[in-house]
Image: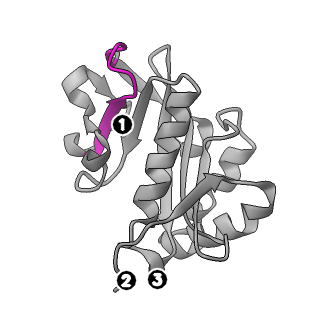
Amino acid sequence: MSTHQTWNTRVETDADIPAVHAVNTAAFDTPAEAELVDALRADPAWIPGLSIVATDEHDAPVGYALLTRCHIDRTPALCLAPCAVLPRHQRTGAGSAAVRAALRAAAEMGEYFVVVLGHPGYYPRFGFTRASRYGIGLSIEVPDEVLMALTLDTGHPLPGGTVHYAAPFGI
């Protein structure tokens, strides 16, 4: 197992597309999960500057985090998905570095709200809490602890409502 280290992060470039696909293919169980980023690139939910890579010493992507447009009812928000890391670099901080960089980039762009459908043991470290606490839900049944929400600006409280994801998510 690798140890925690400091990672460089940067916005994904067109040259990174094959490497990001390889990261997702190695990290996810199914081709549909791995190909989600490719599908999102063709969707209006894609926001340039919110696709972040964590890179190794050769500037090659080893981890990846993506924020795309979603809505909480009619309020614009962002969805954090996916976050992936090459298996040999998992548990080294590469994924956390990419997520933190993506959240910083979103805040700098003036975004306020982020939701994530993910592992309840991972995302609270970034400030995510149960979305149900704010009256945020999905149109499908999921365990309460896996849908989480975060406000990037404490002056803008999280709105209640149903999360509407981009079409490639299939929700």
User: How far is the residue under mark 3 from the one under mark 1?
Assistant: 34 Å
| Disc number for residue 2 | 2
Q: Secondary structure at mark 3?
A: helix
The stretch in magenta equals 146-158
Q: Amino acid at mark 3?
A: Arg
Dot 2 and dot 3 residues touching (CB under 8 Å): yes
Residue 152 rendering spot, x and y as whole percentages: 40, 28
**Residue 61 vs residue 148: left or right?**
right
- Report whether residue 165 is seen: no
149 sits to left or right of 120: right
Residue under label 3: 88
| Label 3 vs 1, first from the N-terminus | 3
Residue sitting at x 49%, y 13%: 74
Q: Is residue 10 above or below residue 134?
A: below
Q: Residues within 10 Å of mark 2 (few under 14, many from 20)?
A: few
Q: Where is mark 1, residue-wise? A: 140
Q: Say whether marks 2 and 1 touch (CB < 8 Å).
A: no
Image coordinates for residue 113, horizontal then vertical, percent: 42, 26
Please tell me which residue lies in front, 76 or 64. Answer: 64
- In the structure shown, which secondary structural element does the residue marked by tag 1 occupy? loop
**Circle 1: residue type:** Ile
Residue at mark 2 to residue at mark 3: CA–CA distance = 7 Å
Q: Nearer the viewer, mark 3 or mark 1?
A: 3
In terms of depth relative to the viewer, which is nearer, 11 or 90? 11
Q: CA distance from mark 2 to mark 1?
A: 37 Å
CB within 8 Å, label 3 to label 1 = no
**Badge 1: few (under 14), some or many (20 or more) residues near its Cα, within 10 Å?**
few
Q: Amino acid at mark 2?
A: Ser
